[in-house]
Image: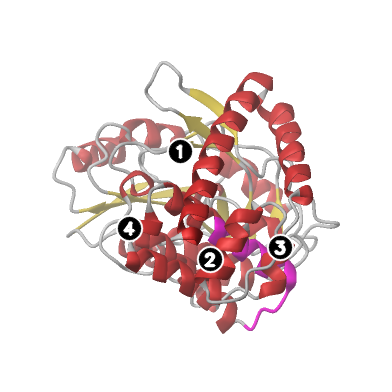
Amino acid sequence: MSESVDVSVVLPIYNAEKYLDQALSSIEVNSRVSLEIICVNDGSTDSSLTIMLDHAARDPRIRVIDKPNQGYGASVNRGFSEARGTYLAIVEPDDYLDGPMYDDLFEFACGFDAVGDGSGLPDVVKSPYWRIWMPETPDERRLHCAYFDRIKPAHQPFTVFDCPRVVQHHPSIWSAIYRRGFIEDANIRFKEVPGAGWVDNPFLFETMCQAKSIVFKNTPYYCYREDLPGSSSATRVLSLSFERWNDMADVVDRLGITDQGVRKALATIAFRYAGEAVGQGALDDEDLTRAMGEMFARIDEKTILSLENVSPQLRQLAFRLSGREVPKISKLGYLRGLVSEFAYSIRTNGMGFARMQTALYLRRRSSQDKKSETYEKS
């Protein structure tokens, strides 16, 4: 391998034998940039290590780090600490790439370096991703993510304050590359907890809120398998959502960010987590109810009232759980938002899927609203 490395790709790997060959093969397709692929074996007990070593024997760009199990955050931190690339990237071993993602994103970044000496390279290069919906079932489909064709800053490079939507959706930290010098200078590291632990959430806010230059290429490459059995999204304890939201809020507070757009994006995430939790019976659990109330208490009333993408009932619940007077909230803005989302879904993923998703969303929302109303009367 040459001394100069353009992109270092880190894979935190724990018992991923079923998907690992596909993940590595999809990364190896990148051929125009100088690439290193750092496989961090996090104490796997299956054949993952053998698969890594087999690939490393065929591709000199691959390095294998074998260590005891410490969790996702510690594994990525280890990979980052040994990386030599101008940019850093992350691939989760149960996902894969469609196309030369790192070739394209690195070359896209270089287009913003007018001098050509690296001094003008953006801190973050972001892209949308493919949702692999209902993976490994007869209904499996590949769909655009919720921010495809929606990140439209007035200029590039931009910052999170120019386009707060870049932090509003699924964290998708793996659909980007990060300039290593930026990560090191800002001293950004993953939270180290056992397992996966949803540590991608605070990392998203650390990187996007501290980046002085972000560029967005509206081309999806990364294929994210949603809700696989055993994944952190499928098995998480409900309270973890609120813990990680508080971690994100701590980042925003520590950085002294008062920008209303960023604050609204953060609040939108809070309501997304709360809605999911209410739908799963969180209002019957005193600890979860208290955790939601404490989360909502960190959001100012003006921001809650401004969130027309959140149902009036859920916003009223936020006032109630945080011990504040409950206002009347019009449904008009919320209904307009539903129509807009339906139109976007048709445009990006087709009428059939839009109708199905809207019906599912409305059923879930009806269940959440009924549980909120029942809580109000109890």
Among numbered discs 3 and 1, the one appearing first in the sequence: 1
Residue at the spot of label 2:
180
Give me the C-alpha separation between circle 1 and circle 2: 19 Å
Q: Which amino acid does label 4 sit on?
A: Tyr
Q: Which amino acid does label 2 sit on?
A: Arg
Q: What residue type is labelled 1?
A: Ile
Q: In the rendered view, does 239 fall on the left or right side of 153?
A: left
Q: In the rendered view, does 275 fall on the left or right side of 328?
A: left
Residue at the spot of label 1:
27
Could you say which quadrant of the image residue 358 lies in?
top right
Residue at the spot of label 4:
72
Magenta residue span: 256-271
Could you say which quadrant of the image residue 191 lies in?
bottom left
Q: Residues within 10 Å of mark 3 (few under 14, many from 20)?
A: few
Residue at the spot of label 3:
328
Give me the C-alpha separation between circle 3 and circle 1: 52 Å
Among numbered discs 4 and 1, the one appearing first in the sequence: 1
**Quarter that holds the C terminus:** bottom left
Q: What residue type is labelled 3?
A: Lys
Badge number at residue 143 = none
Q: In this rendering, which labeled residue sits more in front, label 4 or label 1?
A: 4
